[in-house]
């Protein structure tokens, strides 16, 4: 366990909230900062707007956004170079939806033109052909997904999705989780998100770290330990967070039950 004194504050940067702030994912940075400071860890939460050099941080959160701002954010991050350099040195990078897509090799804009991503995750996104994936999303963490510091598997993930992109995971990355309810990556293998080293991407909004505190603590533990390490953290009283989780999971369960009943009634009638 740790709340070991650090010589400098744990720095968490929310990347370009002015471009990638549409879906409330900036809350992920806040959740991480609060969970660290509740444990007595000195924390600096930076809202790193575009148009300025990206600061150096221990942990970067990149949120979802619309197609145009996503293209601008990816181009600015590639030109700036700080994020890729920091990830190479072991910084934790957590991307959600547009933030996930731009960590990969390429992603489409609204006209279906392909744009280069940062290449931090071996994923590629193309435009989906069907309807946009919108709704609650539940997924179980893959057996070769990231493990909690005690080596156990993480509890299933809950959030909501809203995207048109379809993401394929290449051999250089692994699927983060398997969809129980919803669409996720949409590539036909039931995968949701991807990860490699300390870079994690997901389609889950929420903000996802408010609904999935084990994932939040996993990222924090990585950021607090040296490269390659993972640190377990003192447990917190998560009564409220667990109630939120249970409430959201119950909504999905209930609507699933209603769908089954509706199908049965349709078959009979
Ligand atoms: N523009 C991307 C898509 O629709 C990402 C959307 C988002 O971040 N929610 O696939």
Image (cartoon, grey):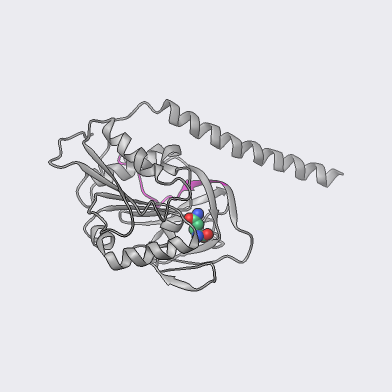
The answer to whether residue 163 is left or right of residue 208 is: right
x 33%, y 28%: residue: 236
Q: Nearer the viewer, residue 115 or 246?
A: 115
On whether residue 148 falls in the magenta region, the answer is: yes
* Residue extending farthest bottom: 113
On whether residue 180 falls in the magenta region, the answer is: no
Res. 50 image quadrant: bottom left
Image height of 95 relative to 242, above or below: below
x, y (%) of residue 134?
59, 51
The answer to whether residue 201 is left or right of residue 139 is: left
Q: Is residue 118 visible?
A: no
x 68%, y 38%: residue: 257
Res. 55 image quadrant: bottom left
Q: Quadrant of the N terminus?
A: top left
Image height of 143 relative to 68, above or below: above
* Residue extending farthest front: 51
Q: Is residue 218 visible?
A: yes
x, y (%) of residue 104?
40, 64
Q: Quadrant of the C terminus?
A: top right
Res. 209 image quadrant: top left
x 49%, y 32%: residue: 244
Instruction: Give the magenta range.
Output: 136-149
């Amino acid at each position: 366990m740790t709340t070991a004194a650090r010589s400098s504050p744990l720095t968490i940067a929310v990347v370009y909230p002015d471009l990638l702030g549409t879906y409330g994912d900036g809350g992920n940075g806040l959740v991480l900062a609060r969970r660290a400071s509740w444990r007595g860890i000195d924390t600096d939460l930076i809202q790193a707007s575009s148009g300025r050099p990206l600061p150096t941080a221990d942990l970067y959160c990149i949120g979802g956004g619309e197609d145009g701002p996503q293209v601008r954010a990816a181009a600015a991050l590639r030109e700036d170079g700080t994020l890729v350099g920091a990830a190479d040195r072991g910084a934790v990078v957590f991307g959600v939806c547009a933030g996930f897509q731009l960590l990969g090799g390429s992603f489409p804009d609204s006209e279906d033109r392909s744009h280069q991503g940062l290449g931090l995750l071996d994923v590629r996104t193309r435009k989906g052909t069907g309807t946009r994936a919108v709704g609650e999303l539940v997924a179980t963490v893959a057996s070769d997904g990231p493990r909690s510091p005690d080596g156990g598997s993480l509890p299933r993930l809950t959030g909501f999705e809203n995207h048109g992109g379809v993401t394929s995971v290449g051999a250089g990355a692994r699927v983060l989780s398997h969809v129980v309810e919803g669409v996720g990556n949409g590539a036909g293998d039931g995968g949701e998100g991807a990860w490699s080293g300390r870079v994690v991407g997901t389609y889950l909004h929420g903000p996802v770290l408010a609904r999935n505190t084990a994932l939040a603590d996993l990222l924090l533990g990585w950021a607090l330990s040296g490269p390659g390490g993972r640190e377990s953290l003192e447990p917190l009283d998560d009564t409220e967070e667990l109630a939120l989780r249970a409430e959201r999971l119950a909504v999905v369960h209930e609507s699933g039950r209603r769908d089954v009943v509706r199908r049965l009634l349709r078959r009979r009638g």
